[in-house]
Image: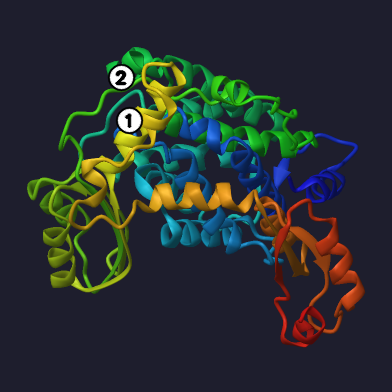
């Protein structure tokens, strides 16, 4: 996946010296590398997802959140790190998915605030900004739970600061940060009994560690391609992405409600407290007094939406049936262990037809991703950033765009190079439509 973009990104990065500072373009490329690395580990992270809800979509939610952030900078030519950081923060807030994605957006928001007006970042600047990101993540939830992404970002940020105080350059500091994040992830089952019972580490923490590792690989000029996985049997894949062992009780989980709230003089803490008092759990309210991203789990989504409407204008409303997703996750886990037969693992369940069931957006995203592997995509794209985004989805790229239109022959060759019998062709420019047709 993204083979050409990987090599181009590595060549762009190659330098005969170690990196002492990040400018805006370094921060941009490091974040794009983090997204690519996270996307490649998405399914493995999904398989770990048992807390706060075992719905198997933490990897997907974090990947889509980071994708939304990178879209804001894909074509950005800004050289000031603070400008790139602010664009990343805005994109992540607008595109945050799920509990983990919402917390990730707050980490990026805190980092952006910590960078302030800095055009370049030293190792110490980055470490201090990451500490600001950790504090922002803790503030966005009412009752922080240790053994989660919160623990990992805090311990990683502390390690970054200690490394910077020792005089480390950017590479050494990120290396120390990733090492600390890996240790923190490994220790999450000792802090959160639910993880130990399921036999997994925290998915959100693993996702954050993967993001930091992608940034480190960029600074080192290392490959962003993972080793090929064995695909000779489904058993091999099941072993690699073995889901955490969980049992799901009837009516244990309700619905995940996520929306953007636009208004005036919004009271972030007051809204968070009100949602919790209304029975919302895993509530994350992030943003400022004019624009908030709201995430909560509730048995009564209508009540949450009514409250949101009373405060301002709602956008990007998304409701997922957590009970249905959790039952599917638990059934898949048992199927992998041979506890129930394969057919039973995918049998219809009671929760899948409940009120407000929107077919589970997380499950739909996963299904779409599976389908995308059987339907090829050819996209006409210009610009390194957008090439990376499209290749991240596995698309075949034809260079082109305004004033550089590919021929019908070039498009046909790209289509025929796809291993799929069905191919979606995206011209992405009115001047290319006729050739595409």
- Residue drawn at (44%, 45%), measured in percent from left and top? 104
- Residue 383 relative to residue 266: left or right: right
Where disc 2 sits, the SS reads loop
Q: Which of 200 and 308 is in front in this view?
A: 200
- Residue drawn at (52%, 53%), measured in percent from left and top? 368
Q: Are marks 2 and 1 in contact (CB under 8 Å)?
A: yes
Q: Quadrant of the C terminus?
A: bottom right
Q: In which quarter of the image is residue 418?
A: bottom right
Q: Mark 1 points at which residue?
A: 51
Q: Name the residue under label 2.
A: 192
Q: Please state the horizontal and vertical placement of residue 169, each as a whole percent of the image.
A: 70, 31
Q: Residue 108 carries which label?
A: none
Q: In which quarter of the image is the N terminus?
A: top right
Q: Which of 437 and 315 is in front in this view?
A: 437
Q: In which quarter of the image is residue 72?
A: bottom right
Q: Can residue 425 be seen in this view?
A: yes
User: Distance from label 2 to label 1 (Cα)?
Assistant: 9 Å
Q: Which residue lies furthest to the left in this view?
A: 277
Residue 55 sits above or below residue 417 on the image: above
Residue 367 sits above or below residue 342 on the image: below
- Residue drawn at (74%, 66%), measured in percent from left and top? 379
Quick one: label 2, few (<14), some, or many (20+) residues within 10 Å? some
Where disc 1 sits, the SS reads loop
Q: In which quarter of the image is residue 428?
A: bottom right
Q: Please state the horizontal and vertical placement of residue 201, each as a whole percent of the image.
A: 43, 21
Q: Which of 228 and 188 is in front in this view?
A: 228
Q: How many marks?
A: 2
The mark nearer the N terminus, 2 or 1, is 1
Quick one: label 1, few (<14), some, or many (20+) residues within 10 Å? many
């Amino acid at each position: 996946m993204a083979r050409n973009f990987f090599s181009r990104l590595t060549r762009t990065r190659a330098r005969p010296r170690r990196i002492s500072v990040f400018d805006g373009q370094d921060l941009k490329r490091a974040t794009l590398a983090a997204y690519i690395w996270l996307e490649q580990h998405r399914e493995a992270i999904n398989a770990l997802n048992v807390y706060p809800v075992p719905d198997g979509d933490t990897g997907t939610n974090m990947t889509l959140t980071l994708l939304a952030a990178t879209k804001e900078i894909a074509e950005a030519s800004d050289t000031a790190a603070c400008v790139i950081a602010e664009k990343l923060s805005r994109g992540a807030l607008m595109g945050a998915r799920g509990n983990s994605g919402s917390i990730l957006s707050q980490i990026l928001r805190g980092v952006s605030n910590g960078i302030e007006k800095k055009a370049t970042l030293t190792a110490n600047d980055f470490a201090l900004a990451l500490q600001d990101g950790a504090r922002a993540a803790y503030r966005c939830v009412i009752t922080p739970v240790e053994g989660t992404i919160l623990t990992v970002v805090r311990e990683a940020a502390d390690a970054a600061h200690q490394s910077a105080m020792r005089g480390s350059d950017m590479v050494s500091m990120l290396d120390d940060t990733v090492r600390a994040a890996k240790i923190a992830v490994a220790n999450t089952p000792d802090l959160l009994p639910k993880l130990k019972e399921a036999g997994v580490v925290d998915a959100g923490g693993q996702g954050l560690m993967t993001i930091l590792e992608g940034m480190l690989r960029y600074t080192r000029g290392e490959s962003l391609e993972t080793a090929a996985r064995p695909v000779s049997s489904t058993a091999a894949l099941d072993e690699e992405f073995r889901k955490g062992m969980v049992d799901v009780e009837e009516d244990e989980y309700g619905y995940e409600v996520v929306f953007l709230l636009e208004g005036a003089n919004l009271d972030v803490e007051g809204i968070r407290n009100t949602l919790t008092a209304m029975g919302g759990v895993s509530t994350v309210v992030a943003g400022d007094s004019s624009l908030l991203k709201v995430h909560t789990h509730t048995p009564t989504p209508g009540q949450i939406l009514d409250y949101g409407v009373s405060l301002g204008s709602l956008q990007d409303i998304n409701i997922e049936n957590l009970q249905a997703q959790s039952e599917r996750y638990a059934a898949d886990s048992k199927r992998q262990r041979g506890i129930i037969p394969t057919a039973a693992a995918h049998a219809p369940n009671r929760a899948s037809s409940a009120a407000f069931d929107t077919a589970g957006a997380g499950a739909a995203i996963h299904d779409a991703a599976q389908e995308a592997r059987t339907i090829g995509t050819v996209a006409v794209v210009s610009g390194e950033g957008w090439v990376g985004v499209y290749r991240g989805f596995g698309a075949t790229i034809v260079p082109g765009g305004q004033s550089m239109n590919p021929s019908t022959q070039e498009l046909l060759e790209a289509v025929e190079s796809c291993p799929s019998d069905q191919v979606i062709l995206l011209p992405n420019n009115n001047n290319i439509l006729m050739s595409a047709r």
